[in-house]
């Protein structure tokens, strides 16, 4: 995610009045839903190809129903996302185009808006958890892996070759020569598919609990003709006992450890499955682990919400620890050391305000 594009809502305070803040927040939440629709239907992409347009022309160009497009444009115009003139013709400003459309040079923030509707779909289940405890299982979250794959496509996949893998001097060259690589909690496997394509001499394996995600990854690997990657549906809760001993040179987890049922068991399994000189790269949420120290976190409200309504809950649904997304550096280092790792470096990347990157030597 590009931090230069983030504009935070005004803080609720006595200076502006809570009522004014609330109206702003309500409008912002509504806009997230409509931005998600604009992204999913391709409306932003269609507008980017047009000059000033009306609802009929835009609907025809996008292959959509005009009446719905007209109302959507009303939300976009009153929300300041698009411009409108007196004849009710609309324009997507150039400065918004790069941040709301698909493309090789885009930083498509519209992807992130989808989390609001995806999480909203399990609100009733979460309310029951507030009353009775427990959690909401993965299969309840329609489209979550799809959205996560789009999200990681911006923060991880596009940055792997130039920014993330070079955090370890010499790693790219070693992967070019040939290494064994495991990605735990791989989701749809976007990161490992990218690496498999970049490094044909290395062999890759991805593990994830979700049957839907693994099916997608396998199909994508076949479509790309990748012979050096495989995927397995697997619950890693007992990874400490079941991980293959000293099998991999390099293990990765991307935004995955904090929502595991048993994070410490997974980390111990990663240590177990690494070769004696193996390397572990963990991407996880940037946080101090303390609410009072996270008050100025640019994505604090969003990340605590995702944590409550997904990360923590899916772990608890498995009878797990419910660690939550905002576990923070201190807790992460504590668990890594308990898992047997001592050499731990933590990096942040300019393009990604959401995550920390842990380089961990066995």
Image (cartoon, rainbow, N blue to C red):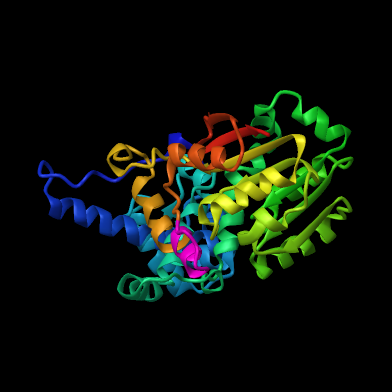
In front of the other: 140 or 237: 237
Which residue is depicted at the point 71% across and 23% down? 169
Q: Which part of the image, by quadrant, shows the C terminus? A: top right
Which residue is depicted at the point 45% across and 41% down? 331
| Figure quadrant of residue 220 | bottom right
Q: Is residue 256 visible?
A: no
Whether residue 358 is in magenta: the answer is no
Q: Position of residue 343 (x, y in %)?
A: 61, 28
| Figure quadrant of residue 312 | bottom left
Seen as rendered, the residue at the extreme top is: 169
Which residue is depicted at the point 19% across and 51% down? 21
Q: Position of residue 354 (x, y in %)?
A: 47, 41
Whether residue 314 is in magenta: the answer is yes
Which residue is depicted at the point 33% across and 59% down? 29
In front of the other: 139 or 113: 139
In front of the other: 17 or 149: 149
Q: Position of residue 139 (x, y in %)?
A: 56, 73
* In this picture, residue 143 sits left or right of residue 269: left
Is residue 17 placed above or below 4 in the rendered structure? below
* In this picture, residue 27 sits left or right of residue 192: left
* Start-end of magenta stretch: 311-322
Q: Position of residue 113 (x, y in %)?
A: 45, 56
In this rendering, the count of numbered labels is 0
Is residue 296 placed above or below 305 in the rendered structure? above
Q: Is residue 321 visible?
A: yes
| Figure quadrant of residue 119 | bottom left
């Amino acid at each position: 995610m590009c931090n230069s594009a983030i504009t935070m809502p005004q803080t609720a305070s006595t200076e502006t009045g809570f009522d004014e803040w609330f109206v702003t927040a309500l409008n912002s939440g509504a806009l997230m839903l409509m931005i998600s629709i604009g992204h999913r239907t391709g409306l932003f992409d269609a507008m980017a190809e047009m000059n000033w347009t009306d609802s009929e022309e835009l609907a025809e160009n996008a292959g959509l129903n005009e009446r719905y497009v007209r109302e959507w444009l009303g939300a976009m115009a009153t929300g300041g996302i698009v411009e409108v003139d007196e004849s009710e013709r609309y324009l997507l400003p150039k400065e918004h185009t790069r941040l709301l459309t698909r493309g090789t040079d885009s930083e498509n923030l519209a992807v992130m808006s989808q989390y609001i509707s995806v999480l909203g779909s399990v609100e009733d289940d979460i309310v029951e958890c507030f009353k009775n405890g427990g959690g909401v299982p993965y299969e309840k979250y329609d489209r979550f892996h799809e959205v996560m794959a789009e999200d990681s496509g911006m923060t991880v996949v596009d940055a792997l070759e130039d920014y993330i893998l070079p955090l370890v001097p010499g790693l790219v060259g070693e992967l070019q020569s040939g290494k064994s690589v495991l990605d735990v909690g791989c989701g749809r496997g976007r990161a490992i598919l990218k690496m498999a394509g970049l490094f044909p001499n290395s062999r890759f394996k991805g593990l994830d609990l979700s049957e839907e995600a693994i099916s997608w990854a396998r199909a994508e690997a076949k479509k790309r003709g990748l012979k050096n990657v495989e995927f397995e549906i697997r619950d890693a809760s007992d990874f400490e006992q079941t991980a293959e001993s000293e099998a991999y040179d390099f293990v990765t987890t991307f935004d995955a450890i904090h929502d595991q049922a048993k994070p410490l068991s997974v980390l111990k399994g990663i240590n177990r499955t690494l070769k004696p000189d193996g390397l572990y790269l963990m991407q996880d949420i940037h946080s101090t682990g303390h609410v009072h120290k996270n008050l100025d976190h640019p994505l604090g409200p969003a990340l605590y919400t995702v944590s409550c309504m997904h990360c923590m809950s899916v772990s608890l649904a498995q009878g797990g620890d419910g660690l939550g997304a905002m576990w923070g550096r201190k807790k992460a280092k504590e668990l890594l050391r308990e898992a047997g790792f001592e050499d731990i470096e933590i990096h942040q990347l300019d393009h990604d305000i959401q995550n920390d990157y842990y380089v961990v030597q066995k």
